[in-house]
Amino acid sequence: MKINKHILPNGLRLVHSEDTSTQMVALNLLYDVGARDEHPEHTGFAHLFEHLMFGGSVHIPDYDTPLQNAGGESNAWTNNDITNYYLTVPKQNVEIGFWLESDRMLSLEFSERSLEVQRSVVMEEFKQRCLNQPYGDVSHLIRPLAYQVHPYQWPTIGKDLSHIAEATMEQVKDFFFSFYAPNNAILVVTGNISFEEVLTLAEKWFGPIPRRTVPVRQLPQEPVQKSLRRLTVERGVPVDGLYFAFHMTDRNDPDFYACDILSDVLSNGKSSRLNQRLVQEQKVFSSIDAYISASRDAGLLYISGKPASGISLEQAEEAVWQQIQELTEEEVGEHELEKVKNKFESTQIFNNISYLNVATNLALFELIGKAEDLDLESERYRAVSAERLKQVACQVFRRENASILYYKARK
């Protein structure tokens, strides 16, 4: 993949990759701000801005209509590390995209009406996803159990509904001008457009936006967990739930790839260990999953499942410990490891067929290192040996490194 890069005088990083097989262009604008950058008493702001950025900017009161009239589409997502906006548009209308994205980087409209509308939307989402949905508060329970000081202790949607309900215009403006700046963003453009045109349009629309003073990130580092943590809650849910969280490496650590492979050995597909042994054969669980948070700072490897009828949470927990203990005592076989690595490789290939996916992935890799590393992902998974996998399993799957949530169905 040919990648072109440039940094504007105001600090905006440009990344470009041309794809002439499509008549479309994708713009992906990644802001280096997420829930971890929020004040502990004002959480949910990054997610709120995911919505506010569509509520009108200083010169464009309606973001969606011009883009839709140009044949384009847009969306956004937020996590604890970043806020990501993207749009697609026919190549002949690509300047519309630069115009729209640059104006909302310059400044939002900051009207009381827009804030009230988007605040209501976010609050309703909080209620539906976290308060009124079975198991919806799991993230609010297990994150602060695993993280005692790091801001990963609250989910992206926010720690408490009141933080958004009571958000003031002054707080909102301060958050925007602290983080939504050209020198805190990466613009990736892919599809049927030349690098020369990208440079011209970027300089025209983004060049005049001034740099801003972005706060230096000084997050408290999570201390090493030294004892197993437990929490039991009762809720009005249909069946019990069991949740494990193990501390693991950050995204840039070489052992990140080993942790990802471990989670897939445990639970990726019908032939994975937890599904094959604990669901199909032993019938301890009706469903079970394992996955990683893939966060920039030290993350978590999760295992979660619903015990089968008649199985206690204690029995289910012990069954999981038996399976993960095996990973610490015996090396994963060559065939099993190769199968998992092949899945990573095929996923990598399919994920980068779409010009839009390429735009998003290039932005993520430019943020954590350099965009060119996208082409090295398969090699990094391939480089993990069975011996190293066992060593990492011994580091991660220690009982004193675990936080366990018993989510009991109220009788």
Image (tube, rainbow, N blue to C red):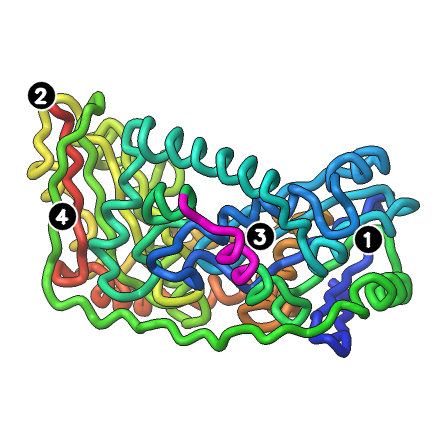
What separation in Å lies between label 3 and label 2 (alpha carbons)? 45 Å
Disc with the residue nearer the chain's start (3 vs 2):
3
Q: What residue type is labelled 4?
A: Gln
Residue 405 shown in magenta: no
Please provide percent x and percent y for residue 316. 13, 37
Please provide percent x and percent y for residue 268. 39, 42
Name the front one of labels 4 and 1. 1
As drawn, the label of residue 346 is none
Residue found at the far right of this picture = 92
* Residue 108 relative to residue 296: left or right: right
Residue drawn at x 43%, y 54% is: 338
Above/below status of 51 relative to 400: above
Quarter of the image with the N terminus in it: bottom right
Name the front one of labels 2 and 1. 1
Q: Name the residue under label 1.
A: 99
What separation in Å lies between label 2 and label 1 (alpha carbons)? 57 Å
SS at mark 2 in the image: loop
Neighbor class of circle 4 (other Cα within 10 Å; few <14, some 14-19, many 20+) is few
Q: What stretch is highlighted in magenta?
A: 166-175
SS at mark 4 in the image: helix
Disc with the residue nearer the chain's start (3 vs 4):
4
Q: Name the residue under label 3.
A: 348
Quarter of the image with the C terminus in it: top left
Badges 2 and 1: C-beta atoms under 8 Å apart? Answer: no
Quarter-of-image position of residue 242? top left
What separation in Å lies between label 3 and label 4 (alpha carbons)? 31 Å
Badges 4 and 1: C-beta atoms under 8 Å apart? Answer: no
Residue drawn at x 50%, y 53% is: 46
Q: Foreground residue, 324 or 252?
A: 252
Name the front one of labels 3 and 1. 1
